Image: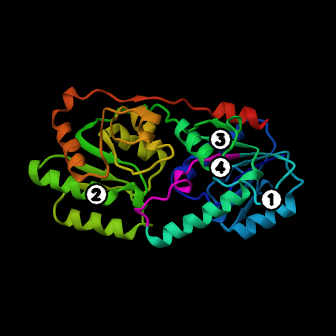
Amino acid sequence: MILIDALFINDGGGKILLDYLIVQLKKSDLDIYFLLDDRIIGNHPGIIPERVKYLKGSFIKRHIFYRTNKHQFTKVFCLGNLPPNIRLKATVFTYFHNLIYLNVSKEFSLKERLKFKLKISILKRIAKNSDYWWVQSDLIKEKLQLKFHFDADRIKVMPFYPQFTELESIIIREKNTYLYVSNATPHKNHQRLIDVFCQFYNKYQFGKLILTVNKDYPEVLELIESKIKKGYPIENIGFVDRLTLQKKYLSSEFLIFPSLTESFGLGLIEAIECGCKVIGADLPYTYEVCEPSFVFNPYDENSIFHAFEKTLSSQTIKPSLPRIENNINQIISLLK
């Protein structure tokens, strides 16, 4: 039996990958058991109740689960960056997709930085419990190897991501629309983006900014609402289903992506798949995933402003291109 351990995954890009993985595993003949976060109970009605355990996202509860079931599995796939708390006889694959574990952004509050430093110390202690590490890019492989001194053959670059299906209806792309698909944790850089867009709009009376900030980020929501009340063309669609998101990509001219750190940047790939031109942060993660139309310095408001200005002559902007492939079939094959 194979265990898919996705405890602690309940939203964001990790949840999108989990949903996709579950759908693909259903198509296989693998004998699967799931360990999932209780915040997503009811999200996957297709899973047989006897084949899933929901737990509160707790290191202690996870430890008890592994102690109790340590002889039940032949392979374990940990999707949430952390290997099991104990050494198992099973072959363990850990999917490492959060660069914050390697470098905590200064944009986080002191409380959040301390929380991640605790997680990093835990990871250091239990890293030996994983036989193999799967990562989303060469950049993460390099940083992970440097941090933990793993043998290179224990780390494999295995990006996977859900791809949109072709729509029958025709979506009209709106000119001068700037979409940013992301949650609003501090390193996602929403405040700079919103402030600069408003400066740009003040000067040119041009464009529309579209965001996907959900209720978990009240400070950013308050900022958005205050700007909307002042008449700025900002639309916040919150967290939406995949079909609605696809339509929003198809109707937007640009994806602007100012995040200060990313392990992957799923939105970059999704946007290119749907024909958006990517205005990306001039940081390594962008170039790992795609060839953007052009880039800017996400720490510098002047650079972000000039990026908006550059779109005024959008006819001369080159299209963006992907640089990665989907490895979901290889992942499922290795779990057999």
Label 1: which secondary element: loop
Q: Amino acid at mark 2?
A: Arg
Write down the residue under mark 2. Answer: 192
**Disc 4 vs disc 2: which is toward the camera?**
4
Label the magenta part by its dominant secondary structure: loop
Q: Amino acid at mark 1?
A: Ile
Write down the residue under mark 4. Answer: 148
Write down the residue under mark 3. Answer: 134
Neighbor class of circle 2 (other Cα within 10 Å; few <14, some 14-19, many 20+) is some
N-terminal of the two: label 1 or label 2? 1
Disc 1/disc 3 C-alpha distance (Å): 19 Å
Write down the residue under mark 1. Answer: 86
Label 3: which secondary element: strand
Rendered view: 87 above or below 242 = below
Give residue 330's position: percent from left, percent from top.
68, 31
Q: Residue at x 84, y 47 (%)?
A: 90
Q: Residue at x 66, y 58 (%)?
A: 123
Neighbor class of circle 1 (other Cα within 10 Å; few <14, some 14-19, many 20+) is some
Residue 99 counted in the magenta span: yes
Disc 4/disc 2 C-alpha distance (Å): 33 Å
Q: Which residues are magenta?
A: 94-108
**Disc 4 vs disc 3: which is toward the camera?**
4
Do the CB atoms of the residues marked 4 and 3 lie less than 8 Å apart?
no
Disc 3/disc 2 C-alpha distance (Å): 33 Å
Label 2: which secondary element: helix
Label 4: which secondary element: helix
